[in-house]
Amino acid sequence: MKYMATYDLMESARNTHEWLGASARAFASYPLFAMSMNPMLPMMAAWGDVAERSFSRMIAKPDWGIRSIAMPDGQDHLVDEKIVVERPFGNLVQFFVRRRAPMARRVLLVAPMSGHYATLLRSTVASLLPDADVFVTDWHNARDIPVSAGKFDVEDYTLYLVDFMRELGPDTHVIAICQPVPLALAATAYLAAEAPEAQPRSLTLIGGPVDPDAAPTEVTDFGHRVTMGQLEHMAIQRVGFKHKGAGRLVYPGLLQLAGFISMNAERHSRAFAEQILRVAQGEAGDHDAHNRFYDEYLAVMDMTAEFYLTTVERIFKNREIARNVFTVAGKRVDIGAISDVAVMVVEGEKDDISAPGQCIAALDLLTGVDEGKKASHLEPGAGHYGIFAGKSWRLNIRPLVLNFIDANAGGPKAGKKPAVRLAASK
């Protein structure tokens, strides 16, 4: 399937459905039809409205939409997005709060590169901004990166994190979410060997596959069933001439989206059917709950073929992180070399992507870290999304993470460590 024709065929199908939706909405909304009592016309217009919006969102990167935050001084402070480090495959972006002095907490959010944009962490960023200076890894859509920029695999991802950590300095607190958890662990271990003075103060690992075999899920089962040859044949295509990355081998976002939806097809079908009824009855809003969720969920990005394939092969199949045999640029990265970084693990009880047990496996690998600097938390009843952006994050996990950061910030706060260990550990 490594052809431009198949890539362009998917884009043509998406484009056609967007056009059909727009045409149905325009036709059924023709003023003359207002005299008709046929209920199918409002339903047709509603279907067109939902279809046009949904298919158009699949190719647009969502905006962060964080304009301002309320501060204790009673004023709203404007927020600017500033590029700190610019790279071909991703930037280090700061959410700079105007008229605010640098905060004691400096947080690096490591966003996943797993089909969705970093804006999936919008609510996570917004919740941390009042209490910390926040930096985010903002990964680029592979279809927009020229072939001349070269490859990008799990080792390159790890080295990007190394460079970002070096840029921010040793007073940084890293929070890795989902897919990049094992690579953030590897990047920290790389620094421990190559530049120990640049290691972050703390590392918070949220719902990531450090040891995928520790608790099997549908994701890990798929990784074991399919051979690398089959996976490459089924998933990899070449970007069409319409985009800057023409000819680049990628795992297309539209193909990923089809997989996401198929995992919960019944729930998504019901959600769209209910939304069409709400639109037809005039009860839907441009930013209602359905549109807020699906505007983000449907916005997908292509991954480079080498990143996707090396992630499956090295992290899931060969378990190189779990077995502590991961290498970067020919050098083994020993996770046991980490000694001066406090590490906290957060898992969700009902996480069906990275099930409980997969992430906490990191603590066993950290043989060089004192037990007093390790913490873990299992959030009862929380799914994958909830542990970093939902109710569980807002009410329970976020306060634990901030307390953990404060306890390991160095200086006079170091004395708080034992209390936080008890509060954060389960």
Image (cartoon, rainbow, N blue to C red):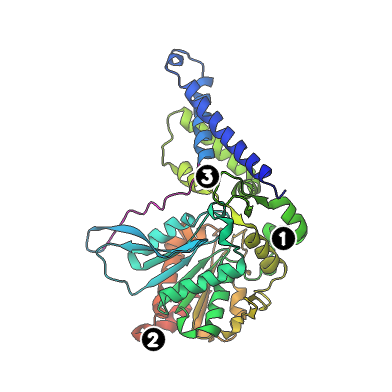
Residue toward you, 278 or 129: 129
Determine whether 338 is above or below 87 in the image. Answer: below
Residue 294 appears anywhere in the view: yes
- The residue under label 1 is which amino acid type? Gly
Name the side, left or right, on which 272 lies relative to 200.
right
The magenta segment is: 57-71
Q: Which residue is drawn at 41% across and 68% down?
A: 399
Find numbered disc 2 in the image and state the secondary structure of the residue it sits on.
Answer: helix
Q: Position of residue 64 (x, y in %)?
A: 41, 53
User: Magenta stretch: dominant SS?
Assistant: loop
Find numbered disc 3 in the image and state the secondary structure of the residue it sits on.
Answer: loop
User: For the residues carrying marks 3 and 1, which lies nearer the camera in this image?
Assistant: 3
* Residue that numbered label 2 is attached to: 415
How far apart in space, not on screen, are marks 3 and 2 (Cα)?
50 Å
Q: Earlier in the sequence, mark 3 or mark 1?
A: 3
* Occupied quadrant, residue 270: top right
- The residue under label 3 is which amino acid type? Ile
* Residue that numbered label 3 is attached to: 59
